Image: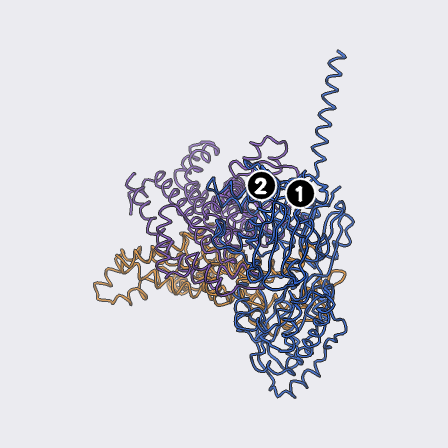
Chain colours: A blue, B orange, C purple
């Protein structure tokens, strides 16, 4: 009898223990805003896709969690030559690759993987170059083909990168998502099996989490990589629940169906901040929203007109009503969190009477008609371009300007703006690598050509000379001086109206600890715990 | 005495049979729901037509100091804006009233265009027969096989989002039902003796189509058309909700709903009111349509 | 019978072909370039754009693109999505079960409540129940369903907390490999306790929203069809003979009343698909409706073409089946013109 009872007791205890261990498996649910296109960052440009692949990968160097500082990643150290043309990377030893499904790695991470990851994007004849579409936008956009002269393996743990010209931001480039390191062995295995497309659908990396499954438009699942070399992972499972509607994300957060939610609606922030079960964090975004004047179209070729328009808009009310105070008025192209920000620059005040006078002085006959382009989609730097356009339209009416609101499908919009079809257009920019050049190139002469990214089409020699010089200098102090001067020139010439830098909010449940907000808007869950 | 009897006998004859319009009205007014629907609709039409005088403000004026107010009876409300304001400080009541104009216009426009086109195609198909008939009917089958909203979205995506294109898109989606209706009715009539007689008498085809056959197809057509208005309003609102309808700052009920979605927790009134406006309008039109159906064609009477 | 079937089936072929042509043309007319749309603020250089257009065959003359497309289609290849680089057919079938499950649930809801309600209303014609039902069903199909969905989310999910907000199942507690793609079935197969309940729980609100309009329509139709039948001579005769109302209703009237109702159910499929687009958008339900809308925004031509074709094919097929069923029930249809 007692034997039976103690067995039962034992079994009961065991069941209880098993039950409790199962229940205490820590799962963090991140409610993401969209579906990834695939799991290879080199092929993507959207934050959504980067976030989806990020748990799985590492780069040679990485941005320290929560800052723009570049720290060692898969390369434990690097040395730059005096002329700035050669960088030698010493790779980390003993880094393990994930095992996914039938793939079991037979070796650790080494130089072959680095070469594979870059050559795939660089060399058109690489066996994997054309796989999954063959578009490596960031590799091209960060000018890597122009900069890279060669990439060589010295030995299993040493890689030498040679550049064509000295380029100060290159280390920051290598910390970006497109430079994620993939497994050359996995590629080989798939090649032999004839299933190359799987490479970008089922990712293998060295990162803190390994990929488990993706259910289209619904869920991505990851589990912790016990052999991760870096910062300790404190949770067991990571789940991305794809929830495109921000209101739904909030509801799920409140209900406990999500642990973490990005891009909350500004309208909900007040309520979220009062809620004791949630915590809201925020940080200035590495971005800028601006209203560009096409200087190639009369009368915006006249500096006075551009300055008048700057004075005609009530920016403070836009911040208050559209950004809902989750943004700060911008006076420069770069945000205050970026080095070389020139705080001494004075912004134009809201003075509609002065604006009217200035327009008259410039010989502009009112009422004047312009078109005002606005984006149809929400951007990180601009929560509601339509609403901002409507507010500007009302402000402009007061100085005798009739603005016609125009929009196109996002891709079409951007293309036409780059062609210079607009008279005035809203747009913006999110920084990629935390380097000022990454913002200022938007006003350079090379971008002012048709199809270029300088949609103001403004080309100013003094500005452009400084821009070209600053990117080659290795000394941050010298670069700072140049960028500060450029900001003064820009404000005076007013090729645009700098609207705002957004403040990026993230919301999570109270029990989530250890999360550090990234200036790049990246979401990383290593070092994060949930209670 | 004989005169008395004769007089009394003459009386009923004097009270002649009421004309078609009057008898229709008697039939229609028996249905209390229909009359109620008509009354509500009349009210909405008046609001739409006289919006400029009735609405307290312009629907596009922004009152930046009074954004996102709840209706006046709530704690933080303000009687200057009886139904509250939206995110840009535009008066909700005014926008709803002007929105009636937009929605009714769309509904009416879609109905008129699709009926005109539908009748034309339907009659042509019925009278031509053969290849033309088959071609027209196949195209109609094609339109029907793509789910309505999907087709409308596709058309608007091609033409670009605007008020006019919404009307075209919804018209195309609704076309088949009118074509089929008229064709079936017409073909039913064509077999009848009076048509054969008219033909033999030498009446030209067009005249035959329009003056002879068409009036006899009218009853079901009118009913469908009336109900079509309400459906058109719903489809247009759906397109507006998806951002594919009239563009800002035109106040359209569907896009007002879409804009208000973010306030679903903080300010539920902004979400409730435009939808309620759509609901009330559509219900009243449907009530009226039901009444029309019962009055016009007793065979179709749904009791 | 066979001839009837073949004739009907044959008619769908030209419709399908015309559909192919029309969607191809329409989608090509949609402004916006698929490659452009996916790029961020940067845009894309002219050379790279040309390179990718060449790869997707977008630089070929349009007729050649169409011919290629038809050729591939005949081989069962619906193209490859420009956005995800997956085969369109694969993507469609990954998402379609979710839409089917939702539609099925909505239909069960509509039939399960609508038909009995309509029958009862017909039997108790003029009563309070009847009038309430008529009022409710009128409201039901006058309702903009996107508003209805938002209202229900606001009240039921947020204020009352009775149902979850979105998704198909509780992701924290349950994970299992999808076998059929139908969450309810897969949950049962997984054997995890509570999984089925969670899946059902997630289906309730979207299902009710999607099923509201069919419910209203079916209730009305059933009622009027029932009323017509009840007023027929043979029913009155049966009643006069003293047969119990139940036998009269159950055996004779109901069966005959249901014939037009069955047709309507079949024809609802088209409007269910349209409704699914809105419902899936509001509830973030991962089905083909939502996918279609997103494909339009992304200018994903192959996905859009394939998606519209496949959805329409489903609708055509269901209509064909309904025609068959109707034809087999009612011989007049088969032999008449």
In the image, residue A351 sits, relative to residue B8, either above or below, namely below
Q: Is residue A314 left or right of residue C179?
A: right
Quick one: SS at disc 2? Answer: strand
Question: The N terminus of chain A appears in which quarter of the rendering?
Answer: top right
Asked if badge 1 and badge 2 are on a common chain, one would say: yes
- Quadrant of residue A106 within the rendered picture: top right
Q: Residues within 10 Å of mark 2 (few under 14, many from 20)?
A: some
Quick one: SS at disc 1? Answer: loop
Q: Is residue A189 left or right of residue A518?
A: left
Image position, residue C76 (x, y; %): 39, 45
Image position, residue B300 (x, y; %): 42, 52
**Residue assigned mark 1:** A93
Image position, residue C146 (x, y; %): 57, 54
Question: The C terminus of chain A appears in which quarter of the rendering?
Answer: top right
- The first of marks 1 and 2 along the sequence is 1
Badge nearest the viewer, 1 or 2: 1
**Residue A262 visible, this orientation:** yes
Q: Residues within 10 Å of mark 1 (few under 14, many from 20)?
A: some
CA gap between label 1 and label 2 equals 29 Å
**Residue assigned mark 2:** A213
């Amino acid at each position: 009898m007692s034997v039976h009872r103690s067995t039962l007791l034992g079994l009961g205890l065991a069941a209880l223990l098993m039950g409790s261990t199962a229940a205490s498996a820590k799962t963090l649910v991140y409610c993401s805003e969209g579906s990834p296109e695939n799991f290879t960052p080199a092929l993507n440009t959207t934050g959504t896709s980067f976030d989806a692949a990020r748990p799985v990968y590492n780069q040679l160097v990485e941005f320290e969690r929560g800052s723009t500082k570049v720290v060692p990643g898969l390369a434990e150290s690097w040395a730059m030559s005096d002329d700035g043309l050669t960088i030698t990377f010493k790779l980390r030893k003993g880094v393990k690759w994930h095992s996914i499904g039938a793939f079991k790695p037979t070796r650790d991470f080494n130089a072959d993987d680095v070469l594979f990851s870059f050559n795939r994007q660089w060399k058109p004849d690489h066996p994997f170059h054309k796989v999954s579409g063959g578009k490596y936008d960031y590799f091209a956009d960060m000018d890597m083909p122009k900069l890279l002269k060669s990439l060589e393996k010295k030995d299993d743990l040493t890689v030498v990168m040679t550049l064509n010209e000295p380029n100060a931001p290159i280390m920051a480039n290598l910390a970006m998502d497109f430079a994620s390191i993939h497994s050359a062995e996995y590629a080989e295995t798939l090649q032999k099996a004839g299933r190359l497309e799987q490479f970008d659908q089922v990712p293998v990396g060295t990162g803190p989490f390994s990929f488990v499954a993706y259910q289209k438009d619904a869920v991505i699942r990851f589990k912790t990589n016990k052999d991760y070399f870096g910062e300790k992972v404190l949770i067991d499972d990571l789940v991305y629940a794809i929830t495109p509607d921000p209101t739904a994300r909030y509801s799920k957060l409140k209900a406990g169906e999500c642990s973490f939610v990005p891009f909350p609606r500004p309208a909900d922030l007040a309520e979220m901040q009062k809620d004791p079960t949630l915590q809201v964090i925020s940080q200035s975004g590495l971005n800028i929203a601006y209203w560009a004047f096409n200087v190639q179209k009369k009368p915006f070729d006249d500096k006075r007109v551009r300055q008048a328009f700057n004075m005609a808009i009530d920016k403070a009310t836009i911040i208050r009503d559209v950004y809902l105070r989750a943004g700060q008025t911008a006076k420069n192209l770069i945000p205050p969190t970026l080095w070389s920000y020139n705080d001494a620059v004075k912004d134009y005040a809201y003075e509609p009477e002065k604006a009217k006078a200035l327009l008259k002085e410039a010989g502009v006959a009112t009422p004047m008609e312009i078109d005002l382009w606005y984006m149809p989609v929400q951007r990180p730097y601009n929560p509601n371009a339509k609403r901002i356009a409507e507010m500007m339209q009302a402000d402009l009416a007061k100085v005798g300007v009739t603005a016609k609101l125009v929009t196109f499908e996002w891709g079409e919009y951007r293309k036409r703006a780059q062609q210079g079809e607009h008279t005035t257009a809203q747009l913006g920019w999110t920084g990629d690598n935390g380097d000022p050049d990454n913002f200022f190139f938007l006003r350079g002469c090379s971008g002012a050509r048709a199809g270029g990214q300088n949609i103001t089409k403004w080309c100013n020699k003094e500005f452009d000379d400084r821009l070209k010089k600053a990117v080659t200098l290795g000394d941050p102090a010298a670069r700072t001086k140049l960028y500060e001067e450029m900001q003064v020139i820009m404000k005076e010439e007013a090729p645009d109206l700098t609207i705002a830098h957004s403040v990026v909010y993230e919301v999570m449940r109270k029990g989530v600890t250890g999360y550090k907000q990234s200036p790049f808007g990246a979401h990383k869950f290593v070092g994060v715990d949930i209670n | 005495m004989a005169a008395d009897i004769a007089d009394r006998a003459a009386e009923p004859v004097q009270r002649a049979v009421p004309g078609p319009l009057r008898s229709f009205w008697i039939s229609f007014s028996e249905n209390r729901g229909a009359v109620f629907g008509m009354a509500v609709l009349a009210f909405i039409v008046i609001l739409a037509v006289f919006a400029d005088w009735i609405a307290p403000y312009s629907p596009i004026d922004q009152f930046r100091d009074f954004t996102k107010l709840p209706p006046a009876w709530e704690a933080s409300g303000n009687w200057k804006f009886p139904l509250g304001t939206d995110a840009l400080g535009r008066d909700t009541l005014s926008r709803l009233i002007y929105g009636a104009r937009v929605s009714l216009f769309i509904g009416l426009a879609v109905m008129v265009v699709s009926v005109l086109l539908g009748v034309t195609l339907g009659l042509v198909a019925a009278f031509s027969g053969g290849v033309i008939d088959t071609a027209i009917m196949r195209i109609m089958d094609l339109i029907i096989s793509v789910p309505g909203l999907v087709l409308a979205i596709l058309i608007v995506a091609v033409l670009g989002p605007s008020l006019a294109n919404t009307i075209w898109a919804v018209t195309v989606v609704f076309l088949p039902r009118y074509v089929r209706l008229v064709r079936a009715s017409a073909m039913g009539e064509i077999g009848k003796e009076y048509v054969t007689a008219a033909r033999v008498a030498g009446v030209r085809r067009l005249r035959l189509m329009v003056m002879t056959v068409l009036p006899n197809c009218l009853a079901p057509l009118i009913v469908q058309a009336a109900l079509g208005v309400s459906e058109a309003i719903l489809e247009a609102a759906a397109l507006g909700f998806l951002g594919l309808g009239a563009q800002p700052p035109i106040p359209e009920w569907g896009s007002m709903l879409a804009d208000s979605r973010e306030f679903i927790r903080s300010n539920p009134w902004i979400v409730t009111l435009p939808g309620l406006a759509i609901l009330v309008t559509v219900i009243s039109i449907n009530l009226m349509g039901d009444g029309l159906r019962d009055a016009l064609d007793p065979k179709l009477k749904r009791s | 019978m066979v001839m009837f079937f073949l004739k009907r089936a044959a008619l769908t072929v030209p419709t399908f072909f015309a559909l192919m042509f029309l969607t191809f043309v329409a989608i090509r007319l949609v402004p916006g370039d698929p490659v452009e749309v996916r790029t961020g603020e940067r845009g894309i250089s002219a050379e790279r754009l040309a390179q990718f257009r060449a790869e997707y065959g977008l630089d070929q003359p349009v007729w050649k693109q169409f011919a290629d497309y038809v050729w591939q289609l005949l081989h069962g290849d619906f193209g490859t999505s420009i956005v995800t680089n997956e085969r369109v057919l694969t993507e469609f079938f990954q998402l379609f079960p979710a839409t089917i499950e939702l539609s099925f649930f909505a239909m069960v809801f509509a039939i399960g409540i609508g038909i009995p309600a309509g029958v009862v209303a017909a039997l108790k014609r003029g009563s309070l129940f009847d009038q309430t039902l008529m009022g409710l069903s009128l409201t039901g199909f006058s309702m903009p369903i996107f508003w209805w969905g938002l209202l229900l989310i606001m009240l039921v999910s947020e204020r009352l907390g009775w149902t979850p907000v979105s998704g198909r199942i509780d992701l924290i507690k349950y994970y299992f490999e999808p076998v059929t793609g139908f969450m309810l079935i897969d949950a049962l197969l997984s054997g995890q306790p509570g999984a089925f309940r969670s899946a059902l729980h997630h289906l309730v609100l979207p299902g009710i929203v999607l099923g509201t309009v069919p419910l209203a329509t079916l209730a009305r139709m059933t009622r009027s069809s029932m009323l017509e039948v009840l007023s027929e001579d043979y029913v009155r005769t049966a009643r006069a003979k003293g047969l119990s109302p139940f036998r009269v209703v159950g055996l004779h009237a109901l069966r005959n009343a249901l014939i037009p109702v069955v047709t309507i159910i079949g024809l609802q499929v088209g409007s269910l698909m349209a409704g699914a687009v809105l419902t899936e958008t509001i509830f973030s339900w991962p089905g083909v409706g939502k996918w279609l809308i997103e494909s339009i925004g992304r200018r994903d031509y192959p996905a859009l073409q394939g998606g519209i074709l496949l959805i329409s094919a489903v609708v055509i097929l269901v209509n064909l089946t309904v025609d068959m069923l109707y034809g087999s029930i009612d011989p007049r249809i088969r032999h008449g013109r």
